[in-house]
Structure formats: C-alpha cells, structure tokens
Image (cartoon, rainbow, N blue to C red):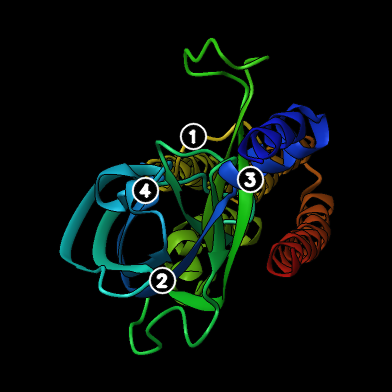
Amino acid sequence: MNKALSLLMVLLIGIPGFRGSAQAQENEKDTVSVGVYIVSIHDIDFKEKEYAINLWLWLKYKNKDFDFYNNLEVPQAKSVTKSFVTMDTTGEKVYMQMKLQCVMKDSWRINNFPFDRQTLRFSIENSQFDRRSLIFTADTVGQHFDPRFTLRGWNIDSCIVGTSVRIYETGFGDTSLPSPHTEYSAFRVRLSVTRDAGGLFWKMFLGMYLAFLIAYICFYIHADGIDSRFGLSVGSLFAVVGNKYIIDSSLPDSTTFTLVDTLHGITLAFIFTVIAATAYSLNLVKKNQHKKAHRFDMIVAQVLLLIYLILNFYFIAQARVD
C-alpha cells in the first residue's frame, strides 16, 4: 500500500500541470501594505532641483525576510535618514513604522515660471526582492499629509498615493535570468503644488517694466534732445539684460524658451524699436521736418505701448492657464 502511494506521488509530481501548481505556491507573492503621512516639505532649492521631505512610513507584511529597515530603497533620494523605527512581530503580520527625512532630487518644469505647477514625487522599493516575490498595495485610509503644514510660497492641490512597476533593463549580474530584464514593485506618492506667484512676479519683473517705461518716455522728449533719448534707451537696454541675468541665476538650466525668456525678449525688442524710432526722428529733424518728427513719435508711442501690453497680457495669461 505504501509503495502504491509513493508511486502515485511520483507520477503526480511528474505531471507538468501539477508541478507548475506546486511551483506557483512556492513562489507565491507576498503583499506589502504601505502608507505614508507627510509631516513637512521644506528647503526647496529650485536651482539645484531638490527639496527636503519629512514623513511617517508604515508597512504591513508576512515575510520577515523583506527586512525593510535595511532593504528600503528611495530611488530619487539624495540622502535618507531613518528614525523612530518600531516593529511589531507578535501577530500574523509584521508591522513596521519609521520616520524618514529625505533630500529628494526631482525635475522642475520652468516653462511657465513663476506661474509654474510642480509635481513632487516620492517612491520606495525593496532592493532585494523583485516583483516575483513582493507586491506593494497602497493604504489609502485617512489623510496623506498634515493639512496644518504650509509650504511657503506654494499651494497644495492634491496628494495621490498608488503603486506601479519599475522596470530595469538589466539583470544586475544575475546570470540565471533568461534576459537582462527585471521588474520591481514600487509604492509612489505624487504631491501636486502650484506657486503663489502674485507677489513674486512683480518682485522679479518690476525692474524690467520700469526699464521699458524709461525707454518709452523718450518719445515725449523733443527730438532735439538726441543725447537724452539715446542715453535713456541704451541704459534701459542694459537694465533689462541685467534683470534677466539675475532671474536666470536663480533658475535651473533649461533648453526650452520659458516665460522669463519670452517677456525679456519682447521687452528688448521693443526697446530696440524705440532706439530705431529715435534714429528716424533724428533724421527728420536734420531735414528740418520737426512737426513730422513729433507726429511720428506720438503715433509710434501709442502703437508700441498697445502692442507691448497686449503681448504681455497674452503670454502671462497663457502661462497661468497651462
């Protein structure tokens, strides 16, 4: 009888479907429930594309080999500090809680600066267990950030938590893999923020607009005062260039044409137009056509100001909408 049972077991194990079922049970994925509570976000460095975040992180799972204290990976972090770590292993599941202080690197979108909208990203993975062994699920109960903390100069629009799969086109030296391709489960947090840009806009661009107005005043100086007109216009030109360099020094490098570039470019073009109009008025004065020169100045002054205002309102409105 025992021999018959042994033979039956051998035959069952030899059947492909039974073997696959047994292997599937051995490789059953463990689910890790993850939740976060953001305490604060501070030290936003726009130039260096980084910010600091303090948050509480908790995990619930069965497999003690996961060892999230040592295997926790924050892919986008420049530095990670763990503190107040607690672990409860008395129940069926391991419950771990810790506070993380991270300096995160991220990419900023500055096309519409200072009316920009940014997405702050935070994600975790387990460095030792891939998607074949570990799957994250998001704990979505309750709030995900402290509504009492204020992000100075920014408004928090939303905070979304979820999971995804991080794909690496490498085997990390594992020659047992059929191809250099690995997948890791990832838990992600996306915090959408918009800049409170009213005061910042005028603080940054007031000098540029004053420079344009100084150049614009040249139209109301008699054409005989050629030195004054050229002096004010050229001085305004350099003032706008200097203002742009000051703003650019606080922004990360960009290969695209931003709102800052657009507004300064328009202002430079219009100041150059003022200089060109002044040169034409001087030419009319030399021909003893004073009335024609004055009429030309008044027409160009009104048209130039109108077009300048329209272009500024248009590009600023577009930036606020995007």
Residue 9 in the image, given as x and y percentages of width and height: 69, 36
In the image, residue 71 sits, relative to residue 191, either above or below, namely: above
The numbered mark at residue 66 is: 4
Residue drawn at x 76%, y 63% as measured from the top left: 318
Label 2: how many Cα within 10 Å (few below 14, some 14–19, many 20+): many
The residue beneath circle 3 is 165
Question: Cα distance, mark 4 to mark 2?
Answer: 19 Å
Residue 182 in the image, given as x and y percentages of width and height: 60, 28
- Residue 274 visible in the current orientation: no
The residue beneath circle 2 is 36
Question: Cα distance, mark 1 to mark 3?
Answer: 30 Å
**Label 2 vs 1, first from the N-terminus:** 2
Residue 174 in the image, given as x and y percentages of width and height: 50, 15
Quarter of the view holding residue 77: top left
Residue 1 in the image, given as x and y percentages of width and height: 66, 41
Q: Nearer the viewer, mark 4 or mark 2?
A: 4
Q: Say if mark 3 contacts mark 4, CB within 8 Å.
A: no
**Label 3 vs 4, first from the N-terminus:** 4
The residue beneath circle 1 is 253
State the residue in front, 269 or 99: 99
Question: Cα distance, mark 3 to mark 4?
Answer: 18 Å
